[in-house]
Amino acid sequence: MAKAIEKKDKFHTDKSPTWCPGCGDFSIWMALKEALEKLQLEPEKVVIVYGIGCSGNMANYVRTYGFHGLHGRALPVGEAVKMINPGMTVIVVGGDGDGLGEGIGHFLHSVRGNHDLTYIIHDNQVYGLTTGQTAPTSAKGFVTKSTPFGVLEEPVNAAALALAAGGHFVARGFAGEQMHLVDTLVRAIQHPGFSLVDVLQPCVTFNDLNTYAWFFERIYKLEESEYAPNDRMQAMVKAMESATLPIGVMYEGESTPYHLGVEGLDISKPLAEQKLKPRNISTIVEHYL
Amino acid sequence: MEEITLKIGGIAGAGIKSTGEIFAKICLRSGWHVFDYTEYPSLIRGGHNTYHVRAATEPIWSTVQYIHILIALNEEAVRLHLEHVIEGGVVVYDPSVVDAEKLGRGRSDVRFCAVPFAELAISSGGIEKMGNMVSIGAVVGLLHGSLKITKSVIADIFATKGEQIVSQNEVAAEAGYEYVQEHFSEPFAWTLHELDAPEQMLVAGNEALGFGALAGGVQFYAGYPMTPSSSILHFMAKYGPKQGVVVKHASDEIGAVNMCIGAGFAGARAMTASSGGGFSLMVESLGLAGITETPIVITEVQRGGPATGLPTWTEQADLRFVAHASQGEFPRVLLAPASVEECFTHAALALNLAEIAQTPVLILSDKLLAESQKSTEPFTSKHVAIDRGKLMTTREANRQKDYHRYEITEDGISPRAVPGLPNTLFLANSDEHDTYGYSEENAENRTAMVDKRARKLEQIKDLLPKPIIIGPKQADYTFITWGSTMGPVLDAMRILEAEGHSVQMYRLPVILPFPSEEVTQFLETTTQTILVENNSEGQLGGLIREKTGYELDVHMLKYDGRPFFPEEIVQNFLAMIEEAH
Ligand SMILES: Cc1ncc(C[n+]2csc(CCOP(=O)(O)OP(=O)(O)O)c2C)c(N)n1
Ligand code: SF4
């Protein structure tokens, strides 16, 4: 992996990642940069908003406009950036604790709103940065420092939730399948509207259940089967599979992004570039005379 | 000064607010100054609602308790409010609903005018609901006011409902007007005569904030409803989009404020508002705006707290909370408008300050200010100027070779780029960061960044309104206030001055950065100070003590959810003097 990190690309910063050697975050990071390259995007045309967690630390390692926000709160920031500047490609990066714990409300509302952004969840079934407590995606019975008697709750299924909330692009990736992840991300970024890419990511330090080997035994690629991702109910069946884990695009449907419906938004030019003059309020004042 | 006050009382849903507003507008268009005040419990149906309109021939700033005309829509209105009807006052009521005369036995100094509201509404060709218009017509009749103005107000209010509704309401008002001419010819002590005065508008604090934000170039507004801040969202949603403002009813307050931060980061002037509980949810994000140096404006419209508290009542008990909200240290501005005029100017100013200092600006309002309408000179954008501070243009960005978003500058403010500009990539980082925005925890960097951010406030000092002194210099007594309590204090001063007392008022329109020097200098020379606040702890008094070492002499505090009434301040003042002697 070390070799690939040294590769200099236009999305490269000179900061060295602080992730644990072997962490799945490395390949998500490289896949994302690769996808941006493939789409021939310029760093100046991309905004990435990050949550807080090991996943969010990626903020320092990708050379685009970036916003490293609060734990669980990245999505509303990204939504507004897209509304204000629809010309930018907006990507939101977060962890499973971040986006499905603190931020689960924002997640559902962002899907419902079909805000045009790509939401990448680093789904490692554990809290990495705070040293290994249970995450909302942890398996039932999983033992961690904060759950010494095993998790009692059912795990959150991000893909199924997004489908239930009306999501128009729902995909899963795996950090151990980097090239496949690049292709999935490319499709997600191209999709107009909200796209979820839930990336299965081994945390080699704190999760000894969901390891690379564990995932390799279970995953299979949807693109290698007859599966056509155009049926929400079928997608739901795929999303709910548990003995085996499909990766790839589960569902993609017709989609009108949120910002196209916003009354008053002049998308011809970014708001920041529109000349600001004090507004004439006289016609409104008339209602108050 | 001539004065007329009218109170309408009845159950929620009886059209009390709209009736009150129509009367307020009739007074306004007759050239009078107006201040109104509404009380309602946190119920949609049922419960006792009131609307109090005060009109005067000279400028007024507050509501009072006394009543010249009481429109009683139910018996409770008579029971609760008759004691405040002054000698020579009148109770107007529908005898088929209320036996006011019987209830009011013992008040031979008050006139009881029975007007069959519902019956007249129906016999004039309308429906029972238009009884409210009959009551308005009756009141205008008693006051010898203008039927023409009354009709013009009705026509405007019902314009969207079609001609038939307009004319039915007009006829109902006329029926009330004629009825009193016929049945109550005995002259009434007060008349609503037309004044030759310049045109005024009637506006509530929340709407004034909306006007100020629009004038000041707001481009993004996100909010989540919470009384008494909701009407800012309603105003923005109604008028914003036509003016190119993106308005979003967010999923919650955390979403709202983070959207504003995203919009501010992306280069738009962004604003949100809530009340205490919603603001509590925004607190972590307030610090996020501070450390990422993202301009945003947050208005907190106070109600009684804590928790859900008194949703529809007024209080000023969030001063310390808002002043200290969020962990850590970062520069912030806290404005405290005291009138609808200041709500307008402060909103536009706040948008400038936020961009100039690249930091959050807070506006602290309260229910009294937010929901009371006051007459004022029509707002105009003429004197509004937009200053975006060190926001880069594309041309400036093009010249950048090695852009540092958080460059350590002498004034603490760094040139600001926004996503989409060339050559200016940066990371806005909630973690402490270096000059590019990359996470950096080393000791020197941390100190330098904290210092850099702190220096900013120095740059905007000259743009901030100074403490305001009203009244004779070197008065014997000084009332010290902030926010909406200015109104009742000013009106109390008028009464006290007339009685020969030497009083002045000292008010802080800006709480942070705290004007320590000015306040210290002022307190060095004052005699007796009286702190007037709508809270139980004297929060501004505490802040003054902290920043200047001065303890104010007398604390006049009220925290029952109701605003101060000028009469009350006068009474407290007189009792205080009495005690001293
Ligand atoms: C409001 C708030 N609560 C808690 C934290 C502490 N915290 C930081 S990261 C994190 C969990 C990280 O887990 P996850 O989102 O799954 O990301 P990972 O580190 O596994 O990539 C927590 C609880 C915080 N920063 N802010
Ligand atoms: S703790 Fe886990 S998620 Fe975080 S860097 Fe290490 S391996 Fe990766």
Image (cartoon, coloured by chain):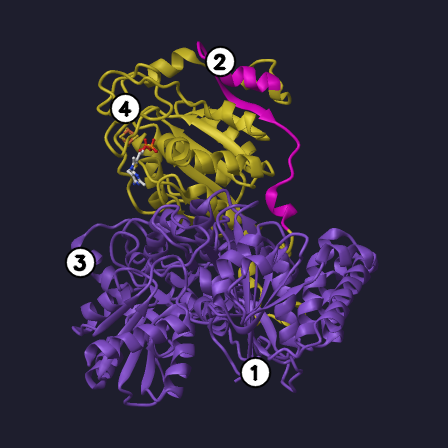
Mark 2, residue position: A241
Tag nearer the camera, 2 or 3: 2
Task: Specify start and end residues of the magenta stretch as a single range.
Answer: A233-262
Which labelled disc corresponds to residue B444? 3
Mark 1, residue position: B57
Q: Do callouts 1 and 3 point to residues on the same chain? A: yes
Q: Do callouts 1 and 2 point to residues on the same chain? A: no
Q: Position of residue B214 (x, y in %)?
A: 56, 66
> Does any atom of ligand 2 lie closer than 8 Å to the CB of label 4?
yes
Q: Residues within 10 Å of mark 4 (few under 14, many from 20)?
A: some
Alpha carbon separation for disc pair 1 and 2: 77 Å
Alpha carbon separation for disc pair 1 and 3: 63 Å
Q: Residues within 10 Å of mark 1 (few under 14, many from 20)?
A: some
Tag nearer the camera, 1 or 2: 1
Q: Tell which chain the image draws in yellow.
A: A
The foreground one among B59 and A6 is: B59
Tag nearer the camera, 2 or 4: 2
Alpha carbon separation for disc pair 4 and 1: 78 Å
Q: Do callouts 4 and 1 point to residues on the same chain? A: no
Q: Residues within 10 Å of mark 3 (few under 14, many from 20)?
A: few
- Chain letter behind tag 4: A
Q: Position of residue A145 (x, y in %)?
A: 21, 24
Asked if residue B458 is positioned above or below residue B444 in the image, the reply reads below
Q: Amino acid at mark 3?
A: Glu
Q: Do callouts 3 and 4 point to residues on the same chain? A: no
